Image (cartoon, coloured by chain):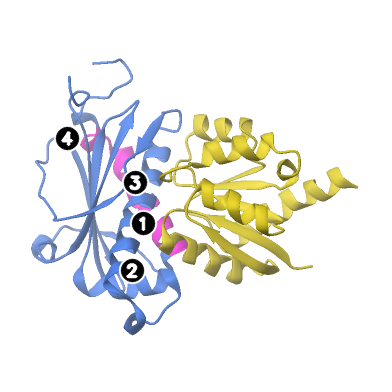
Chain colours: A yellow, B blue
Amino acid sequence: MAYAVLIVDDSPVMRSFIRRVLGLSGFEVGECMEAGNGEEALRQLSAHRVDVILTDINMPGMNGEELLRRLCADGVLKTTPAVVISTDATNERIVRMIQLGAQGYMSKPFTPETLREELERVLGERDATRS
Amino acid sequence: MPPDLERPSALNRDPAAAETAARVAAEVMETMFFTEAVAADCDHDWLEPACAARVRFEGSHWGEMLLALSAEAADPIAASFLGLDPEELTDAQRGQVIQELSNILCGALLSQLWPESTLALSSPELATWEEWPDEGTLHRCYTLPEGRLAMSIRLAAERPGQ
């Protein structure tokens, strides 16, 4: 099964890098969409089916924290797993993002293999919840 | 000075911090830039025309990091990050990748040095390399197959504005 992925990051080169790593990881990506902040992400989510969201935290406009709040407050979108990708690997930040509703947290640097494992884990949990 | 704000002299006197800097730089360059960084003796002749970026951080620690990539290394490193041929790379992409490198390296290093800290990083900005005083500055140079990399990080003596 190929999954639809939404990459949310204000850095165009980071979005390109994540696309590249997804390709290297062996994770089966179908449609791969991009957004530059939380508002753009919500617009993409209202128009497309997305299986998993990969989001940065610090972005102009709606940041990753607010995006997670909006997802949790939405009856439909709250079932779409979100994985935070950030340079911040401090314990407090990780706990905070999980409490806000992130299903996973990847700190940079990360390998294609660890990205694939994290995506498979959160999608496995999503499928287990739905069945 | 709040109790959790380390004095600026602490970083460059801590052998563990230097070891962490070498390890984190090697990990970042290998994992995300597909190259090898090896800690090396300093030779700063190459730094004046280098591509540099600055990141500031604040929270439980306050300070800044300056990163430089030698001119000959910038294109192959940026192209490798994006999966492009160096000829395809634009000036904007080169600058954005160097900013991203400084952001990743700074975040990874701070998280390793102080995992229990609370820190916010500024948006990276392109900069000109500056030689900072040895006292209070953790500075390391690295060799890469593509060229050279240098990094300096220092803590503020007190919170800005105080």
Query: Mark 1 or mark 3: which comes first in sequence?
Result: 1
Query: Mark 1 or mark 4: which comes first in sequence?
Result: 1
Mark yes or no: residue B97 visible: yes
Q: Nearer the viewer, residue B159 or B1?
A: B159
Mark identifier at residue B136: 4
Query: Mark 4 or mark 3: which comes first in sequence?
Result: 3
> Given this view, does label 2 or label 3 mark the residue nearer the observer?
2
The CA span between labels 4 and 2 is 33 Å
The CA span between labels 2 and 3 is 20 Å
Query: Mark 1 or mark 2: which comes first in sequence?
Result: 2
Q: Which residue is mark 2?
A: B93
Q: Residues within 10 Å of mark 4 (few under 14, many from 20)?
A: some
State the image coordinates of residue A42 (x, y, percent, origin top left). Answer: 60, 49
For the residues labelled 1 and 2, say whether their Cβ atoms are less than 8 Å apart. Answer: no
Q: Which residue is mark 3?
A: B106
Give the farthest residue toward the right: A131
Q: Residue at x 40, y 45 (%)?
A: A60
- The amino acid type found where label 2 is placed reads Gln
> Given this view, does label 4 or label 3 mark the residue nearer the observer?
3
For the residues labelled 4 and 2, say whether their Cβ atoms are less than 8 Å apart. Answer: no
State the image coordinates of residue A37 (x, y, percent, origin top left). Answer: 48, 49
Q: Which residue is mark 1?
A: B100
Image position of B10 (left or right of B33): left
Q: Residue at x 31, y 41 (%)?
A: B122
Chain under disc 2: B
Chain under disc 3: B
Q: Write down the region rendered in magenta.
A: B11-32
Chain under disc 4: B
The CA span between labels 1 and 2 is 10 Å
